[in-house]
Image (spheres, rainbow, N blue to C red):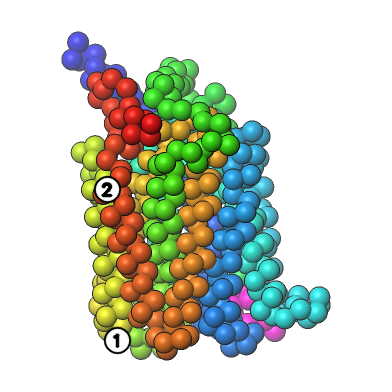
Amino acid sequence: MAKDAASKDDFESQTYLKVTWRLLPFIGVCYFVAYLDRVNVGFAKLQMLSDLKLSEVAYGFGAGVFFVGYFLFEVPSNLIMHRVGARAWIARIMITWGIISAAMAFIGPMANAVGISVESMFYFMRFLLGAAEAGFFPGIILYFNYWYPSHRQSNALSLLLAAQPIAFILGAPLSGAIMDGFADVGGMHGWQWMYILEAAPSVVLGLAVFFYLTNGVDDAKWLAQEEKVLLKSNLEGESHHKSDYPLTKLFSIGMMWVFTTIYLCIVIGVYGISFWLPSIIKATGVKSILMVGLITAIPYALSVAIMLVVTRNAERTNEKRWHASLAAMLGGLGLILSASFSDSTVLTVLFITVANAGSLIAMALFWSFPGSILTGAAVAAGIAAINSVGNLGGFLGPFLLGWLTERLGSSNWGLAALGCVMIFAGVLIATTCRAYGLRREGQQGSPALAAVH
């Protein structure tokens, strides 16, 4: 009996490993270029502001207005994907955002052509980029719900989110090298070439998505029949503990509001770091843009390793609340300390590493929580709603940091404020998220679902 159980466990582990190797490397590359196209405005800022005569406040508003477009179109995008399938819809998302991201290089000429200010064109293009990309990240999370039960999602998500810091590990020096090496080539500035060259892979990968991804388990010709049966059985078994709420009543669930608030606070910290880190590193006394890129990559490289170790331990021990809570609180403390030692490059890198690792760990573990209580169209809409409202933090974080920097002449107070917001996220997780995203071992019913009602 024990031997049979071990054999079954081995088969299950091998099946999920096969799924992970098939999906994660390709989706991770797609997420890498998505994140790079989203945050390379932080590097463009080093040259673009003076070339286009944009203020710090205008930059902060423009960097964040991306998330207004994201907010407005995310739920409809996920519902469409649930209806038409992941393959066609993710391909559409990637191709359109790649085209718009490349067009960011021509903000000045486009503003002159239509007779509006450069600031207005910058805001408009960032809004369009957000609208085009809306649905990609929650679409991927929804896609994972088609393959993994909720207790297995954190490990898959941590591998996916590793693409985010890798976008800085590779993208930061790449952006710096393009901006330095392509300056004045063909009569364009380095930041313009950066936008164009870094957008091209999005279009190419968007075309590849249509041929590589399958919409779900049933369409996967690369799976054996017994593997399909196992995957579907696990998903169906977990679905008995979930609810497919009517979309109009989705936010009558109290925990949906809590989830949204938690994610909003995490994102405020994440994007405050992402959009301003090159400027923070430069302010410590680093002169070369290429060197800023190389140093910026360090905290992201370390964060990947820390995140993978901690999330794996959370799944192994079947304990996610305190892993996520302490990570968010330590991340917030790291932001506060980075503001206190802003004259030291070494200490700034150290504390930003703590901040970034904490935010990534909290985010990877968090996304297993909503999927443990929702199914069907409700999980599609719920994930998108949490992500769309939460991603307004991508507007609030950079704008708050830019506003405080402009008013007080330093980014220190802004970083401290973002750190306090992340600490609050950790407190919320500790006090409300005991039973979510956990492996059920012989339990009768779902404690997570019981907590909702």
What amino acid type should be assigned to the residue bearing mark 2? Answer: Thr
The reply, left or right, for residue 23 in relation to residue 448 is right
Q: Secondary structure at mark 1?
A: loop
Residue at point 29%, 86% (across, down): 343
- How busy is the neighbourhood of tag 2: few (under 14 within 10 Å), some, or many (20 plus)? few
Q: Earlier in the sequence, mark 2 or mark 1?
A: 1
What amino acid type should be assigned to the residue bearing mark 1? Answer: Asp
Residue 138 in view (yes/no): no
**Residue linked to disc 1:** 343
Q: Position of residue 258 (x, y in %)?
A: 40, 47
**Residue linked to disc 2:** 431
Quarter assignment of residue 320: top left
100 or 191, which is in the foreground?
Answer: 100
Q: Position of residue 212 (x, y in %)?
A: 58, 39
Q: Main secondary structure of the magenta part?
A: helix
Check the image and report above or below for 432 versus 195: above
The reply, left or right, for residue 23 in relation to residue 80 is left
Q: Position of residue 51 (x, y in %)?
A: 62, 87
- How busy is the neighbourhood of tag 1: few (under 14 within 10 Å), some, or many (20 plus)? some
Residue at point 48%, 25% (across, down): 223
Check the image and report above or below for 446 versus 168: above
182 or 273, which is in the foreground?
Answer: 273
Quarter assignment of residue 110: bottom right
The reply, left or right, for residue 51 in relation to residue 148 is right
Q: Secondary structure at mark 2?
A: helix
Q: Which residues are magenta?
A: 185-194
Question: How many numbered dots are placed on residues in this image?
Answer: 2
Q: Is residue 188 inside the magenta stretch?
A: yes
Residue at point 59%, 42% (across, down): 78
